[in-house]
Image: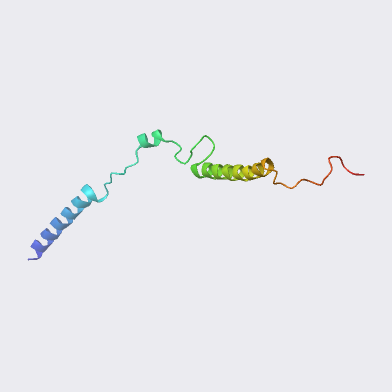
Amino acid sequence: MHRTMTVSRNISIALLASVFLLGGCSSSDVFTSRDARKNISPAMETMAMAKEQRKNRTAYTFDVNLRQLNDDVDMIFLLDRPTYLTRSPMP
């Protein structure tokens, strides 16, 4: 009886090992050298900036442009207050 338990245990271990070898570590998301060559610098969006840096620059540019637009509208409709400073320095 001891021998049959040993044989069945060995068979169970062999089956379990074959299951792990065949499917335990396989993945369809394998990163190959071909994938690396397709996109060598995945974090970079342009030559000098990453995607987030580019988004930050674009947001900053829109912010500055919209604030300048408000100043321009005030100047066009003469809503800005005239300056009381002289063009030449006072002695």
Indicate how the structure is coloured in the image. Answer: rainbow
Residues 66 and 73: in front is 73
Closest to the observer: 58 or 51? 58
Is residue 79 rendered to the left or right of residue 11? Answer: right
- Where is residue 33, by image quadrant? top left
In the figure, 47 relative to 20: above or below? above
In this rendering, the count of numbered labels is 0
The one of 88 and 44 positioned closer to us in this rendering: 88
Furthest-right residue in this view: 91
Point out the residue furthest to the front here: 77
The residue under the point 41% across, 36% down is 39
Query: Where is residue 62 drawn, in percent x and y?
Result: 57, 43
Where residue 41 appears, as percent x and y from the top left, is: 46, 37
Q: Residue furthest left?
A: 1
Return the x and y of residue 60 as percentages of the image width and height.
58, 45
Q: Quadrant of residue 91?
A: top right
Q: Residue at x 59, y 46 (%)?
A: 63
Which residue appears at 58% of the width and 42% of the height?
61
* The N terminus lies in quadrant: bottom left
Whether residue 54 sits left or right of residue 69 in the image: it is: left
Q: Is residue 49 left or right of residue 70?
A: left
Residue drawn at x 44%, y 39% is 42
Expressed as whole percent of the image width and height from the top left, the position of residue 68 reads: 64, 43
Q: Nearer the viewer, residue 77 or 9?
A: 77
